[in-house]
Image (cartoon, rainbow, N blue to C red):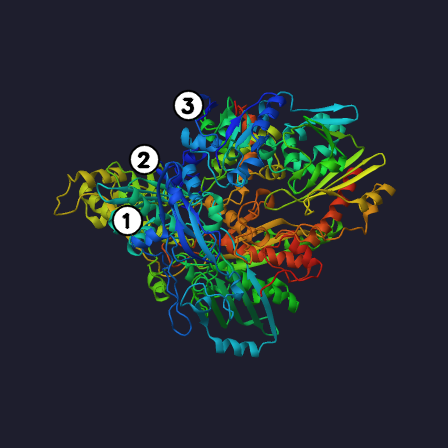
Amino acid sequence: MPAVSMTVNGKPVTGDVEARTLLVQFLRENLRLTGTHVGCDTSQCGACVVHVDGIAAKSCTLLALQCEGAKIITIEGLAEPGGALHPMQEAFRENHGLQCGYCTPGMIMAALDIVRRRGNDLDEHTIREQLDGNICRCTGYHNIVKAIAAGAKAMAKGGARQAAE
Amino acid sequence: MSATGIGATVRRKEDFRFITGQGQYTDDVVRPGETRAAFVRSPHASAKIKSVDAGAAKKMPGVVAVLTGFDLAKDKIGNLICGWMIHSKDGSPMKMAPHPALASGTVNHVGDAVAVVIGETLAQARDAAEKVKVDYEVLTAVVDPAKAQAAGAPQIHPDIAKNTIYQWHLGDAKATDAAFAAAKHVTKLDIVNNRLVPNAIEPRAALAEYDAGTDNLTLWNTSQNPHVARLVIAAFVGMAPEHKLRVIAPDVGGGFGSKIFIYPEEVVCLWASRKVKRPVKWTADRSESFLTDAHGRDHVTHAELALDANGKILALRAKTIANLGAYMSTFSSSVPTYLYGTLLSGQYDIPSIYCEVDAVYTNTAPVDAYRGAGRPEATFVVERLVEVAARQMGIEPTELRKRNFIKSFPHQTPVIMAYDAGDYLASLKKAVEAADVKGFAKRKREAVRHGKLRGLGYSTYIEACGIAPSQAVGSLGAGVGLWESAEVRVNPTGSVEVLTGCHAHGQGHETTFAQLVSERLGIPFENVSIVHGDTDKVQFGMGTYGSRSGAVGMSAIVKALDKVEAKAKKVAAFMLEAAESDIEFKDGKFTVAGTDKSAAFADVALNAYIAHKFTGAELEPGLKETSFYDPTNFTFPAGCHICEVEVDIETGKTEIVNWTAVDDFGTVINPMIVEGQVHGGIAQGVGQALLEGAVYSKEGQLVTGSMMDYTMPRAHDLPSFHVGLTETKSPSNPLGIKGCGEAGAIAAPAAVINAITDAIGTENLAMPATANAVWTALQGAKPRQAA
Amino acid sequence: MYNFTFHRPTTVRQAAGLLARNPEGKLLAGGHSLIPVMKQRLASPTAIIDLSQVEGMAGVEQKGRSIVIGAMTRHADVANSTVLQQALPGLAAVPGAIGDPQVRNRGTIGGSIANNDPNADYPAACLGLGATIITNKRRIAADDFFTGMFSTALEDGEIITKVSFPIAKKAAYEKFKHPASGFALVGVFVSKRGSDIRVAVTGAGANGVFRVKSFEEALKKRFAAKSLDGLSIPATGMNSDIHASPEYRAHLVSVLARRAVAKATA
C-alpha cells in the first residue's frame, strides 16, 4: 500500500493507505479524527469540509494521496491548544447556529473560508450565497447566517488568527 | 426567572462537543475487531428472486461472511412490523404483508436488501457485494398510488387484494353530505402532497456487537427511541430476549421521524454479529439513505369545503389515497389516519367533517412519519381550501378565517380531538401586524415594475402534539402506550442526573431539561446532567417524536422532581428537628416555617445518603425518584404563518421575500431553542413547497436518488424569519407546554402555495412549485395534478 | 471506489508517458467530476495520473489580445484573477458561478472542459468566446472541440495544457442554476468581438453545448437585448428531466440570452 504523509492540525502524520482512500477516510479511520463527517456521496452537503493548505475543500472528494505533503486543518484543530475556542466556534454556540451538530464542523470550516475570501464584514446575502456548498437540515440556516456574521466580526476584533495557520 | 431557569435563553450544554468535533455519532464508535457490512440491494422495483449465488463473493479478499435472505429465513429471524392497528370501515383489520430484513422470495422496491457481505474493511465488503449474483425474474411494478387499486394492477403481496392495506374513515358521512347539499358555496381541490425524503444529514448507521461470554448483544444505532427499537427487535424480530439486548443511540445527527423506525439493517447487523462473533458496522451512504430511509407524505387527495353565503364553513370532506410503499414501516399506518383525519378541523368551528383514507402498497420505499406526520397533510388540505374559498367568494382570507375561528375552549371537533386552549385571533392579529400586511399592496405594485409578481399567503395551522394519552391512543389502535419516563438521581454532593426516556437529536434536551431541574431544585444549571439514549442506563422510555419531549418528557421530570422534593423534605425534617409539614422548600433551601433554621439542598442530599439523622425504619436512605407520566390530552400548538413571495415573471422562479411566524406553544422553556425549532421546521416546509419531491419512474427507479437531483433547501433558498410568540398555556400538563418541533413544517407548505397562487392568479399549482412548474402555471397550461 | 495505482508526474511528458502505459488510466485534475463518479463505481480507471505536481500548468495571463489560462488553474483562481477581471470580466463570471465555493477551490478549467458535462459552465464560455483548447499535441478550436455529451475531440494520450480566450469587447454569462446540483439548468454565454458574435448555450441541449445561429444573426444587426425580442428556439432537441421540460429550457435560452446581452452592454 502506498504511504502518505501530511501535517494535520500541526502534527506530522503518516500512513499506509489504499490508493482509493479518500482524505475523509484517512482522517476519520486512520487518524480517528471523527469531527469531520460524511453526509452525502455526491460532494453536495459539505459536512466533510476541511482546510487543505489554508483553503476549504470537501475531504470526501479528495484522495488522501492527493494531499501528500499538504497542511490539513480539521475542526479538531481550531481551538487553541489551551482550550480557548476559535471565535467562529464561539459564535456558533452563542447564536445557536447548530442543532444536531452533524453539519457543524463543515459549516464552521466553510465559514472560515468565507472570511478568508470575503473579509470580516459580511452581509446576509453574501453569507447565504457563499454557504452554497453546505447543507443543514436542522436550523433553516437562520442562526448559522447570524453566527457567521458575528464570528467574522469577532475575528477582526480579536485580531484572531485565521484557521489554517 | 433565573438566568438559567424556565423561560431563559441559555446557551446549550451540548454545543461544546459539537463545535469542537467531539460529538460521538454511531459511525464514530469503533469496537475492537470491528467488521463492515455492505448490502446487496435489488436494482428492480419488483422481482422474484430465483437464486442467490454467493460463491464468487465469498472468495474475495477480506470477506468474513456472505449472508442471504435464505440464511435469515433458516435462522427464523422474525419480520419487521407495523405497531399501530388500523381497522377499515367494514371493521376488518389492516393487511400487513411480511417484511423480512433480507428478502428471499420477492423484492418489492429498488434498494430492498437481498444479502449482506461482512468484510474486514468497507471497501472489501463493497467489492465482494458486487460479486454476489442474484438471478431475478423482473415483474411489473406498481408505482403510482392513484393506480395501485385499479383492476388489473399487479398485486404486490399475495393475499392483499388491490394492494389495499385499509380503507379507513372518520366522521359523519351523512351529516357532511347533508351540509354540502345545503351549502351556498363549495370549494373543491385536487391535491398531491408530494413525497419527501427526510435526509437527516447524518446517514443511518448501526453497529452490533455480540458478547459470546454473556450471550449479550449491543446495538449502537441512529435511533430516536432506543427502547422501542429494543422492544421490537426482541419481541417481534426475536433476535434476543429484551434483557439480553442493549441499544445505545449516542449523538444522533437529526431524525425528523426517519430514525423512529426499526430498519432491516439494524436487525441484519445484530444477526450477523452473532454469526461471525465480531462487531459488525454498517453506515448508509447517501444513495442508500435515499433508497431505504422511510419517506414522508405522498398523499393524493380530493377535498371539498362547504360554506354558507356569509362564508361560514358548514362542512369539509376529503378522500385520500396514502402511499405506504412496499412494506408497512413501524408507525406508517397511523400517519394518514389518526395523525391526519383528526386535524381536518384546523382552527375552525366546522360542524361536520368526513374523511376517507385508502392506504396502498406500491413498489417504492416504505413511507412513514416525517416531521409533522399527517398534520402537514391535513393543514395543507384545510388551509388551501380556506384560502381558495375566500378568493372564490371575494372575502379577505383573514376575514374568512376570523369568521370561522374556534373562540371558546374546550372545543370538541367532529374528528375526535378536544382542543383545550388557544387564541387563534391573537396569533393572526400579531402576525398580520408583524408582516406589515397593510403595506403589501404598495409592495406588490413596486414589484411589477421590476418584473416580479408579489403574493401573500397565510397558514393558520393547528397540530396535535404531546402524543399522547396511552388509553386514547390504545383505543385508536396503537400497540404501545405513549407516556414518558424520568428518573431523577440526586447525588450525595447535591448534583443531579436526570435519566429521561426521551432522546435528543438536535433538540437541546441536555439544556432545556437542565433548566427545569435547576429552577425547581434551586441548584446551579451546571450541576445537572441529562442522560438519555442507552437502554442499560435509562428505564424504559418512549423516545422523541411528535413534539412530545417538552409536554410529556418534561412532565415526567416534574413528577419525579415532586417526589424528590417530598422525600427531601422528610430528610430535612430530621435534620432540622422539625415536623415534616413545617418544612418549606424555596430557591434551593429547606426552611422550617416561621424560624431561621434552614438546610441547603446539597446538605439535605448528603444527609439522605449518609442517613445519620434517621433510622432505616423511619426513612429509606437515598434521594432518587422515578416517574412515568401519562398525559391527560394531546396538546394543541397553533399559530399563523404569513409568507410573502416574489415570482420572476420570465422564469417562474419564486423568492421568499418575507416570512412571519407567530406561534402559540404554551410555556416556553428556552426561547432561543424554540425559535431554532421554528426556523428548521419552516425550512423543511418551504423545502416541500418549493424544492423537494421524490420522483419514481414508472418502472420504480428513484429518479431523485441523490442530492444532485433531490433539491435540499440551501441557505440562499431561504430568508431570515420573523418569529414571534403568543401564549395560552396547555391545561393538559403541569408545565403548560404544547410543543414546537413540527410547527414550521406543518404551517409552511400551505403558506407558500397560498402566496404563489396569490401572486400568479391561478390555483392550479402542485408542489414542489419549481420555477418550471410556476412558469407553466403562468402560461395557463396544466401542471401536474392529482390523477 | 475500485482501487487503482496513483501517479504524480512532474512534467506533461511524464504524464503523457503514464497515460500511454496505462490505457485504462485517467488524468486527475481537480477531481471534482472524476472522484464522485469513481465513488459511485461508475468509472473504474486502473491508474490515476494526478497533474497537480506538473510545473507551469496553472495561471492566468494576458498574451496580446488573448487571455491564456493554464489547464490546472482552479475555478476560484480564474474568478479572482485581476488580469481577467480587467480584460474580460464576462469570462471571470463563469468560474464564479460553478458549483459551490469548495468546488471552486479545487475544480480546474482543464478538468471541466475535458469532461464536457452537458450542464457544465466552461464549455459555454469556450464556445461563446471562440476559445482555442491547447493540448500537448495541438490547438483545437472550441467549435471543433465539444463533440457531444461527455465527449470531446481529445484523442488518447492527449492532455489539455492551456485554454486561450480571445478578448471580446463585450461578453457576459447568464446562468439558471439547477436547483439541486448547482450545474446549469441553462446557461448562455454571449460575446461580441468585432463582427464575431457568439451565443453559446449549455445545460439545455441533449448533445451538450451549442451555438444559436438565429440569435447570433439577430445580434449582428445590433448587439442589444432588444434585437432578440420575439426570438425563440424550438423545444425539440432540448433536455428533459424533472426539473425542466424541453419547452421551459427553450424558453430560458431566450430569457437568459436577452439578459446576458443586456449585461454585456450595460
Q: Looking at the picture, do discs 2 and 3 lie on one chain?
A: no
Q: Earlier in the sequence, mark 2 or mark 1?
A: 2
Q: Is residue B500 left or right of residue B440?
A: left
Residue annotated with mark 1: B539
Rounded to the nearest whole Å, what is the CA distance between mark 1 and mark 3?
39 Å
Q: Nearer the viewer, residue B351 or A4?
A: A4
Q: Total marks drawn?
A: 3
Q: Is there any visible trace of residue B597 in the rendered image?
A: no
In which chain is the residue bearing label 3?
A
Residue at left 17%, top 38%? B610
Q: Which mark is residue B33?
A: 2
Rounded to the nearest whole Å, what is the CA distance between mark 2 and mark 1?
30 Å
Frontmost of labels 2 and 3 is: 2
Q: Is residue B314 left or right of residue B470?
A: right
Task: Say which amino acid is labelled 3.
Answer: Gly
Which percent across, then down, holds residue B75? 29, 52
Task: Say which amino acid is labelled 1.
Answer: Gln
Q: Nearer the viewer, residue B50 or B12?
A: B50
Quadrant of the rendered image containing residue A29: top left
Tell me the crowding category of disc 2: few under 14, some 14 to 19, or many 20 or more residues within 10 angstroms, Cα based.
Answer: few
Rounded to the nearest whole Å, what is the CA distance between mark 2 and mark 3?
34 Å
Residue at left 74%, top 24%? C62
Q: Is residue B338 left or right of residue B765?
A: left
